[in-house]
Image: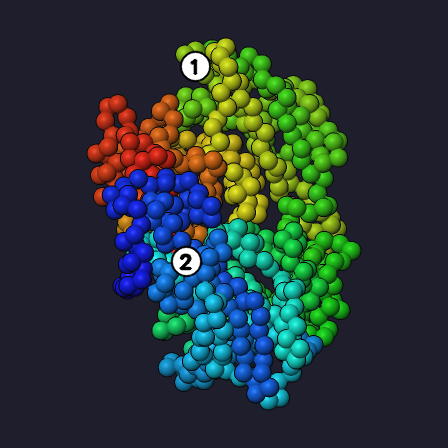
Amino acid sequence: MHYRTSPKALIRLAVVPAVLLVCTSVVFGVPQGHITQYDKAAYASPAMVNFVRPGLTMTITSAAVASDGTITAHVKFTDPKGLGLDRLGVTTPGAISCSLVAAYIPKGQRQYTAYTTTTQTSPITKVTAIQAGADSRGTWIQTADGEYDYKFATKLPADADRTATTTIGAYANRNLTEFEMGINLADTVYSFVPATSTPIAQLPRDVIRTATCNKCHWDMHFHGETGRKSMEVCVLCHQPQSIDPDTGNSVDLPVMVHKIHMGEHLPSVKAGKPYQIIGYGGSVNDYSEVAFPADIATSGACQTCHESNRGATQADNWKLQANRAVCGACHDDVNFASGAGHVNLPQVSDSQCATCHQPVGELEFDASIMGAHVVPQQSSMLTGLKWQILKVDDGVAGKAPTVTFSIQDKNDNPLSISNMARLAFVLAGPTTDYTAFKTGYISEQVTASSPGLKGGPGTYTYTFNTVIPSTAKGTYTIGMEGRRLETVLAGTTKERKIQYGAPNPTMDFPVDGSTVQPRRTVVSLDKCNGCHTRLALHGENRLSINQCVLCHNPVENDAGLRPAAQNPPETIDMAYMIHRIHGGKEVSAESGTSYVIYGYGGSKNDFSGVEYPSPLQVCDQCHVSGSYNPPLPRTNSVVATPRFPTNPTGTTAAACGGCHQTLDAASHFLANTTQLGESCGACHSKSSEFSVNKSHAVDVR
């Protein structure tokens, strides 16, 4: 879509200092006030930024309802520094498209009902449904620079309750594509009592905050580039009033979001019925393959989204207000009318839900809401696991290291090796790449009868069978992994066995008398758990990134587990693997490649359908301190990539190649690698013309 530069804007552009016309410098990833590294504006010249004033802030400062039902909202459009913007894009660059919604909360209810609605007739089912939506055919009246009165075409009905809490929602976009600054989005809400025009400061519907959603979705926006970004605006339309007439599915937010996040685990989906919503223009949105990144199938993981630390005043609604619509969204094989799937108890209203489903019961795993959604590995009935590597002796080249370690329960009671379902130590080095051994690491299982084990209970020593190579240099690492298996509620009908691990202890030590050089920090486990809640892999053995990288190193692959007919093997190098897994469906569609790893027992793990919930280019979702910027440390080994067009592949190329899988990209990697190494930093370093940050800036924000 082309946007014409206005005559006044052309005049302003003409008087910008001449340096603008010849300036080729950019601000490489350095925030300019409100501008971040992911904004296109961060890479424009300062003069152009000063002229365009990118960004969009929108507020509704007041609202009123006239005696005839006419709704008027006073809306301000400014740049992030508070300077007014012209809605039409004449006196300031970038036209603004804005839509408004009016809704109220009926007395005695918790969710909105919209005054602004549309009627949708399905071309598939011929069913007609009322849907909440934006007002149309209203009028804008400018009152000052960047300030407008919007008069709704929709009027309050004559019998409307003017004492009910009423909310005006607005969402907008500002198109700056002609200045190569993308599309800026914003939304806002304003609540008031129509009878008196009294504003309401507290959010009327405040269950989950937008910041919680953005743990996974980064900077969520839906319905294209319209500007709908916040939960506060979403709840105005996504409420019980709205139905998808094509499928009959509710688009009430609590129902829809629970079903979307359950995705492939929905009982109805497992039974063969896809979960779909047909949207604007007949677009089919199939959520049947959505895989929630936390363990939603066994535990619910409710508090991943229902956080109590974000300030939401109704954050505990999920456990205080049990109801059939929300509970039935996930448990959609329950028939409340007949009682099927509900211990044969019909439930004709929500009034009896709390009789059995109290917020918290006396025991975990009971019928209470908290009890029924306990994450098993976080059960308070487990005695727990605390372990630590205390020291490493003989950790030098040519010797077998001896590790001193402790294992205790959560109350500091000593544990015996027999209390562990599995215990192992991993030896790898050097910390620059972990490639000293054939597979990059040595793993030794430890049992009560292991010859190298001494001491206990509580504190032990273990001497490796493996000798550190006599030529070893630098810093090596020993990591501890394992798990416990405990029975809780023994002898009851709720008895269950729970297998669980704990964050892995590791210790670095120099093998040549040099100073310890710890493994560089690339990503944050806290960031991983922002989406995954509790990242535990390989049967609860590995819960820490510093343990993962010992095995997922540049030389390791799945050759030992992959069927011969499926060769060549696939690399499991950490950087390549994680990028490729998270790239999943998007990268597979672009490149025509798949990413399949064979695991223990011949399990086939196909990650080609993974749908990442955030823009792939937002590296900071996982990375820390710009650790993705080339050049990466030159001490790193090349990566063995038997299934990639180049093999081996340079460290940086392998990391970037996890997402950039096309032959064009592979050719680019190859052309910029010589016997001296990779030249990625020449063009893609933080201060270069094609820096990673600049290349990854998003178009819509």
Q: The N terminus lies in which quarter of the figure? A: bottom left
Residue at (69% x, 67% y) in the render = 321
| Residue at x 36%, y 73% (from the top left corner) | 282
Q: Residue 694, position in %: x, y?
A: 35, 43
At label 2, which amino acid type do we have? Answer: Asn
Q: Nearer the viewer, residue 638 or 447?
A: 638
Q: Nearer the viewer, mark 2 or mark 1?
A: 2
Q: Up-down: is 262 above or below 667?
A: below
| Residue at (66, 72) in percent of width and height | 198
Tell me if residue 59 comes above or below residue 472 in the rendering: below
Q: How many marks?
A: 2
Please say whether residue 584 is visible from this viewpoint. Answer: no
> SS of the residue at dot 2?
strand
Type of residue at label 1?
Answer: Ala
Quadrant the C terminus occupies: bottom left
Q: Quadrant of residue 676?
A: top left
Q: Which residue is mark 2?
A: 184
Neighbourhood count class around disc 1 (C-alpha, 10 Å): few under 14, some 14–19, many 20 upward = some
Compared across the picture, whether 462 is left or right of 122 comes to right
Residue 576 percent location from the top left of the image: 37, 38
Mark yes or no: residue 499 visible: yes
Q: Residue 562: horizontal and vertical position, in percent? A: 37, 40
Between disc 2 and disc 1, whose residue precedes?
Answer: 2
Name the residue that disc number 1 marks. 472
Whole-angstrom CA distance, mark 2 to mark 1, is 54 Å
